[in-house]
Amino acid sequence: MDENRKNPVAKTRQVRDTMGVLEVPADAYYGAQTARAVRNFPLTGLRAHPEFVRAMAAIKIAAARSNAALGLLPPETAGAIEKAALEIFHGALAGQFPVDAFSAGAGTSLHMNVNEVIAARAAELLSGDRGRTDLAHANDHVNLGQSTNDVVPAAMRIAAGVLSRRLRVETEKTAGVLREKAAEFDDVIKAGRTHLQDAVPVRLGQEFGGYATSMARWSDRLLRNEDDLAELGIGGSAAGTGLNTLPPFRGEVVEQLGALYNHTFRPAEDLFEAMQSQAAIVDVVATARGLAVDLLRITNDLRLLSSGPRTGLAEIALPAVQPGSSIMPGKVNPVIAESTAMICYQVIGCDAAVAAAAQAGQLELNVMMPAICWNSLFALEVLGNALANLRERCLRGIRADASRCLTYAESSVSLATILNPILGYERAAALVKRAVESGESLRAVLEREPSVKPADLEQIFDLRRWTEPGLLRREAPEAPPSS
């Protein structure tokens, strides 16, 4: 026991595990298994997501309460573990989790890092000596009735649920701002474009309304994912059998977790499936990827519609937030839309990594959970950050150039589409071809066309009406007077 005790004048202290004795910093709460992992995995400099650490701490709180209620932990030990884990749950001791995010398979090192810190802090609370493993042991007390194999998947689901809910809020807020812009731009008539070529007129508000609906639907999809994430396999222990737990344990832990998060969780219907399959995480990250794909499409549209200011479309102007060039004075770039696009690419990459790692599970366990965990939580978090940044620094400040939009709309040769009901497709196409070849406006060509009457022109260039369902009609000729 002595080697576990802190020397007040030393810069390090000795800690022991089943493989021997190691030195750790004197002020460290973590122990030998964490120290070994730090030495074994000097890989990325990335650390476990704080929300994942928080979720593991929550499981330790719930387990301590449950084990105390079941008479398996002395009340004073359970109370100290609970208090230590609550400190971590609320953000304390954040510097005590140095294990690389891509460490031992299944997340054993990440899990033991949390167990060791809680045990040391609990021992300190009980005695003032964080090395008293007889008072609070990482495996025997903090991890009682648990395994990496059920704790890590459950913590991943909890953390993913938290971040998914935050992402859903950002998605809903973004949809709301886009709806506001759709209303603001409702009277702005512009040329539609398909294949990046002239198409029939639309309203700028209709384009932005489409963007708003897209965001709202992704919010609905995220909400559906949250139900699967609420099902937790805690209590499965090492292989899904529940070995070394009592039957009430799993239900007690899930109930306690619900109280900690003010959220409804439920025990997994099948503990083996919950341990074997990462489908719930795969689904929510796939939803994030789908949202990223649509968001990427929208940011590309914003960049295209704002291209210019003199040689592009310039139908809208994005807020100018910083100089755009180190050499071209006055240049301003759509940097917020660009950065959002880069985040979207990253989320797509995270989804690919999660999918590949999820299919690598074998038999009772997926040992690739650290990769699944880091990529999934990173994707959900940064996509929410990107939405908030895009909304506040770009979308709210978009302005429309209504005059330029109308000029493009009136010059579009696809206005000939309106003539289909009275001239037919082939005759209308011939008029378009004539306008393109001569360089004249379509209106000038139509004014010389005998089959197009002045009343037809008046209807054709009443562009607002053609942004809704409608059909060009001619008045029936008057019947000749009867003899």
Image: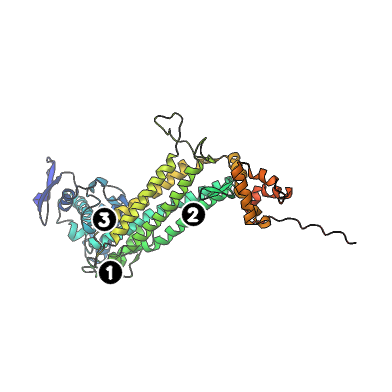
Element at badge 3? helix
Q: Amino acid at mark 3?
A: Pro
Residue 208 spot, x, y in % from top left: 53, 49
Q: Nearer the viewer, mark 3 or mark 2?
A: 2
Which of the pair 200/184 is nearer the observer? 200
Which disc number belongs to residue 413?
none
User: How far separated are the C-alphas under marks 3 and 1?
Assistant: 19 Å
Q: Residue 219's image quarter?
A: bottom left
Residue at image position (58%, 39%) is: 404
Residue 36 spot, x, y in % from top left: 15, 51
Q: Is residue 170 left or right of residue 468?
A: left
Which of the pair 315/88 is nearer the observer? 315
Element at badge 1? helix
Q: Badge 2 is on which residue?
A: 214
User: How far separated are the C-alphas under marks 3 and 2?
Assistant: 32 Å
Which disc number belongs to residue 272?
1
Local packing at callout 3 (Cα closer than 10 Å; few below 14, some 14-19, many 20+) is many
User: How far separated are the C-alphas under marks 2 and 1?
Assistant: 37 Å
Q: Is residue 360 left or right of residue 133?
A: right
Which of the pair 466/342 is nearer the observer? 466
Confirm whether residue 143 shows in the render: yes
Ranked by sequence position, the earlier of labels 3 and 1 is 1
Ranked by sequence position, the earlier of labels 3 and 2 is 2
Residue 324 spot, x, y in % from top left: 42, 34
**439 w.r.t. 428: above or below:** above
Q: Badge 3 is on which residue?
A: 370
